[in-house]
Amino acid sequence: MAEKLNNYENTNRLFDKAADVIELDADIRKILKTPFREVKVELPVRMDDGHIEVFLGYRVQHNGARGPMKGGLRFHPEVDFDEVRSLASLMTWKTALVNVPFGGAKGGITCDPWQMSQRELEVLTRRFTSRMGLAWGLHRDIPAPDVNTNAQVMAWIMDQYSQRYGYTPGIVTGKPLGLGGSPGREAATGKGVSIATREAARDFDIDLKGARVAIQGFGNVGSYTGKFLHEMGAQIVAVSDASGGLFAGDGLPVTELFDHTYEHRTIEGFGQGEALSNEELITLDCDILIPAALGGVITQENANDVRAKMVVEAANSPITTIGDAILNDRGVIVVPDIFANAGGVTVSYFEWVQNIQAMTWEEDDVNQQLERIMVKAYRDVTDVMKQQSVPMRTAAFTIAIQRVADTEKMRGGF
Ligand code: GLU
């Protein structure tokens, strides 16, 4: 049990568990577990103090059987091939599960954006685009925001790519509205998480009205999730980010907290609620726990102390495989990442469609389509969950794997 697996092995373990349920043959398994293409680039940047720093950038294109490969870019000191590979694979299953016509990819740059100026970040992003752009394309691979990247970073990518290849807004999603971004994209992941939470809560007899929710991570995904769940009647009793956490037994004032965080990019300085640590938040007495930051926060060490009835994975891979097994054994419901946070890539798909058609949808239409896709995916997952008596994660993976395997076989070429 204590065996230490790397991120990609962890993800492949989840894959194998589901592949066993559908008795996937060994040949297709090999294809689906091996990434299609992996690129690493050197990124020299003259820093503001005059010296040159050399950063490394990665892109893993995991599988493109069902469409152009799709997935975000993260800027973080821990980015490496192993992490990106694992996240790229999750994108393949996520896009297949919600049935948008994309494959999976992920990328990132090993850097600490909090220590960099806007100019340094812009030069770094443009360098990355120039060197990585060869592997991208409107019908090949389309990046998007992820941890520590935002609409401004996507705008730089769009501009740099378009300088070489001509005006191509659809090369990246999550852009600012004035540059071909989609209404509703910024809020989409959080909106999707709130829909996933609502659906699962209803099925597992948790009344969302008055339910006590703790959210770890209050960036784009966590803050929008909190806002929407609050609108649905839940009480957000705790939130945290890299600066620490805040707790209020009768619910934090979420609207004010959202506005504060939107402006300052941190919950620090909010001035209301009691302090609590990220670790305390994970084991807080609450109904629903929503990890919405980085991977690997619920582990062998703390999974036994989780007191929530349900954990909704707004982040990618927030629970290690052993942590997951412990939660399952304890009967804690886990709403898996490839379903729970799929709202982001779903609206990225709408953005790409709008860009290709040079049209703009109304925000209401975006949200209605998002609702439809999330609810359909939830029904698909829970049907398999009941038929096969497997956890929700395994059910989600079986649906996704079957879809990709079928397409891979139809396309052939091996
Ligand atoms: N980074 C997000 C994710 O993990 C969004 C990806 C996208 O929109 O392509 O799903």
Image (spheres, rainbow, N blue to C red):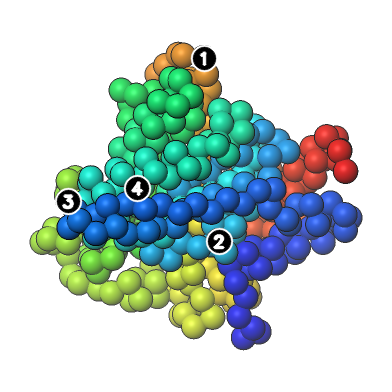
**Placement of 261 over or under 362, stated as above or below:** below
Outermost residue, front side: 51
| Cα distance in 3D space between marks 3 and 1 | 36 Å
Badge 4: few (under 14), some or many (20 or more) residues near its Cα, within 10 Å? many
Residue 364 picture location, percent across and down: 40, 23
Badge 2: few (under 14), some or many (20 or more) residues near its Cα, within 10 Å? many
**Placement of 193 over or under 135, stated as above or below:** below
Classify residue 23 as left or right of residue 148: right
| Cα distance in 3D space between marks 3 and 4 | 23 Å
| Cα distance in 3D space between marks 2 and 4 | 18 Å
**Placement of 5 over or under 175, stated as above or below:** below
Front residue of 260/6: it is 6
User: Helix or strand or loop: what does disc 1 sit on?
Assistant: helix
| Cα distance in 3D space between marks 3 and 2 | 31 Å
Q: Nearer the viewer, mark 2 or mark 4?
A: 4
User: Image quarter for residue 21?
Assistant: bottom right
What is the three-letter code of the residue carrying label 4? Leu
What is the three-letter code of the residue carrying label 3? His
| Cα distance in 3D space between marks 4 and 1 | 31 Å
Residues marked 3 and 4 touching at CB (< 8 Å): no
What is the three-letter code of the residue carrying label 1? Gln
Q: Which residue is mark 2?
A: 81
Q: Which residue is mark 4?
A: 124
What is the three-letter code of the residue carrying label 2? Phe
Badge 3: few (under 14), some or many (20 or more) residues near its Cα, within 10 Å? few
Q: Which residue is mark 3?
A: 264
| Cα distance in 3D space between marks 2 and 1 | 34 Å
Q: Which residue is mark 1?
A: 357
Q: Earlier in the sequence, mark 3 or mark 1?
A: 3
Residue 277 picture location, percent across and down: 28, 74
Residue 289 picture location, percent across and down: 42, 63
